Image (cartoon, grey):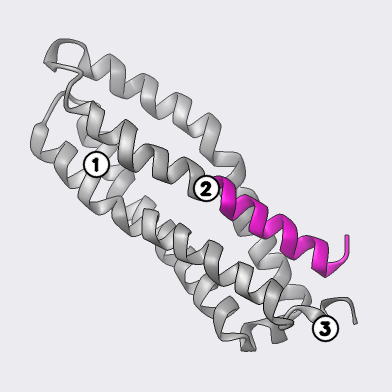
Amino acid sequence: MTEALLLYAHLACTLVMVGLIWFVQVVHYPLMAGVGRERFREYERLHQSRTTWVVAGPMLLEAITAAALVWLRPGLLLSPEFAIAAILLAIIWISTAWLQVPLHERLSEGFDASLIERLVRSNWIRTWGWSARAVLLGAVLLSGDAAYLNH
């Protein structure tokens, strides 16, 4: 696969995550508060397992293609847009590991409205991070910074 195709695949993964994260942020997470205490533990367990099936592939592929691009063409990091997008990807992964996953683990013990509110608030980090990444990576492709990828 050429580096240009790799960059398109990377952007495609980011765009998938943009769609998923906005759905989660605007629809799914806020609706958690309405599930109720009685069925919340089961709901949260199902949420975690099913969401993992949907997001794990695109997230991992996004990280792998980012690493491959940096490995194959480290000069791409000289593009401010690509460098910022790479930093945002790291922030997204850190946020996921240190904020959202622990909140979900605590919510798996039972309903807690304050934890759901923290989940919704903290998830804006990932929502805006992925959204900004899509714009930045699109700018890389449109600007010609990626023109040398096949050389």
Q: Compared with residue 16, is residue 98 higher up or lower down, i.e. above or below?
A: below
* Dominant SS in magenta: helix
Residue 58 % position (x, y): 60, 45
Residue 62 % position (x, y): 62, 55
Looking at the rendered structure, the secondary structure element under dot 3 is: helix
Looking at the rendered structure, the secondary structure element under dot 1 is: helix
Quadrant into which the N terminus falls: bottom right
- Report crowding for label 2: few under 14, some 14 to 19, many 20 or more residues within 10 A (C-alpha): many
Identify the residue under disc 3. 148
Measured Cα–Cα span from mark 3 to mark 1: 43 Å
Q: Compared with residue 45, is residue 100 higher up or lower down, i.e. above or below?
A: below
Q: Are marks 3 and 1 in contact (CB under 8 Å)?
A: no
- Report crowding for label 1: few under 14, some 14 to 19, many 20 or more residues within 10 A (C-alpha): some
Measured Cα–Cα span from mark 1 to mark 2: 20 Å
Specify start and end residues of the magenta stretch as a single range. 1-17
Q: Left or right: where does residue 89 sit relative to residue 128?
A: right
Residue kind at label 2, given as amino acid type = Met
Quadrant into which the C terminus falls: bottom right
Residue kind at label 1, given as amino acid type = Leu
Identify the residue under disc 2. 17
Q: Residue at x 53, y 67 (%)?
A: 135
Q: Earlier in the sequence, mark 1 or mark 2?
A: 2
Residue lying at the far front in this picture: please name it: 142
- Badge number at residue 103: 1
Looking at the rendered structure, the secondary structure element under dot 2 is: helix
Q: Residue at x 72, y 66 (%)?
A: 68
Q: Left or right: where does residue 46 sit relative to residue 18?
A: left
Residue lying at the far top in this picture: please name it: 38
Q: Earlier in the sequence, mark 3 or mark 2?
A: 2
Q: Left or right: where does residue 123 sit relative to residue 77?
A: left
Measured Cα–Cα span from mark 3 to mark 2: 27 Å
